[in-house]
């Protein structure tokens, strides 16, 4: 199954390897211990938050295939690069990425002195992953980080995740996640199998909580 390795960020308001089982639930990528921040950390955290424009639902986050184009390595419309000295405050999982691979997309106001940060970060080949991080503005720490968008394809394996963010009539944030996993069934990549899934999460008690999940189709 042909698939290009270059991707474009699409943010409307306007993982990793591909998994062969579905549905795949949303799990925090990190949850460091809470603590009080000193003056240098407070200043750095304030600078970090200033990189993120204020967003309002409804929002949609996705990464999609494009023709040969290296623009994905640079800030897209509405994004701001995160400098190297501020990336550590996001506490990314795995190797520390370089500043030109991390881009601030926007932030949502949450309850209890917290904000949600949407950030584009490195995927398997290019910065094709979008994370939603819960930032505590009192302790100046990231309490949890979730993958909300990604596009990956290689050797017959394809993984696509997109997210729509809305507010319920009661004012609660809701995340509708659509996910597709495909994998090759033979070495010649002539036969593939795919599973499409859907998840609904709601922000409550300072975390995203699973409301429902459904395996929509196998093909």
Image: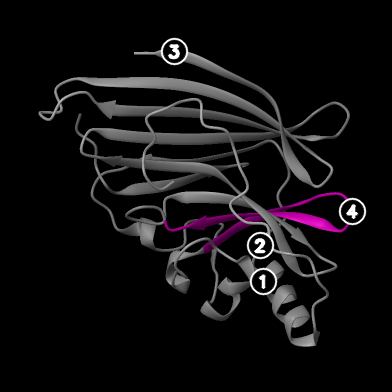
Q: Nearer the viewer, mark 3 or mark 1?
A: 3
Front label number (2 vs 1)? 1
Residue drawn 64% across the image and 71% down it = 89
> Which one is closest to the eye, mark 4 or mark 2?
4
Mark 1: secondary structure: helix
Q: Are marks 3 and 2 in contact (CB under 8 Å)?
A: no
Query: Which numbered disc covers residue 48?
Result: 1
Q: Which residue is mark 3?
A: 217
Most foreground residue, 205 or 79: 205
Residue 184 vs 91, above or below: the answer is above
Q: Which residues are magenta?
A: 103-122
Q: Label 3 neighbourhood size at 10 Å, few (<14), some (14-19), many (20+)?
A: few
Mark 2 neighbour density, 10 Å: few (under 14) some (14–19) many (20 or more) = many
Residue for point 15% across, 28% down: 189
Task: Find out whether the residues at labels 2 and 1 contact each other: C-beta distance under 8 Å.
Answer: yes
Which residue is denoted by mark 2 in the rendering?
52
Q: What's the magenta bit mostly, secondary-structure-wise?
A: strand
192 sits left or right of 85 in the view: left
78 left or right of 194 in image: right
Q: How many other residues sit within 10 Å of disc 1, few (<14), some (14-19) or many (≥20)?
A: some
Q: Quadrant of the C terminus?
A: top left
Q: CA distance from mark 3 to mark 4?
A: 39 Å
Q: Secondary structure at mark 4?
A: loop
- Asked whether the residues under the numbered discs 4 and 1 touch, taking CB atoms below 8 Å apart as contact, a structural biologist would say no
Query: Where 208 sits versus 107, above or below?
Result: above
Residue under pointer 4: 112
Q: Quadrant of the N terminus?
A: top left
In the rendered structure, find residue 61 and report the number of the disc placed on it. none
Residue lying furthest bottom: 40
């Amino acid at each position: 199954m042909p698939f290009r390795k270059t991707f474009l960020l699409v943010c409307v308001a306007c993982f990793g390897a591909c998994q062969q089982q579905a549905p795949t639930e949303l799990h925090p990528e990190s949850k460091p211990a809470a603590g009080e921040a000193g003056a240098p950390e407070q200043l750095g955290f304030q600078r970090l938050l200033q990189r993120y424009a204020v967003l309002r639902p409804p929002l949609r986050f996705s990464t999609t295939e494009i023709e040969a184009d290296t623009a994905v390595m640079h800030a897209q419309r509405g994004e701001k690069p995160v400098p190297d000295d501020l990336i550590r405050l996001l506490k990314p999982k795995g190797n520390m990425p370089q500043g030109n691979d991390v881009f601030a997309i926007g932030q949502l106001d949450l309850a209890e002195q917290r904000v949600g940060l949407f950030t584009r970060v490195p995927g398997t080949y290019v910065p094709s992953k979008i994370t939603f991080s819960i930032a505590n503005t009192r302790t100046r720490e990231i309490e949890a980080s979730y993958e909300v968008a990604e596009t990956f394809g290689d050797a017959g394996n394809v993984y696509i995740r997109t997210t729509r963010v809305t507010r319920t009539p009661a004012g609660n944030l809701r995340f509708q996640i659509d996910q597709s996993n495909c994998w090759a069934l033979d070495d010649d990549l002539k036969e593939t199998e795919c599973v499409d899934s859907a998840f609904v999460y709601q922000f409550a008690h300072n975390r995203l909580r699973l409301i429902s999940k459904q395996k929509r189709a196998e093909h």
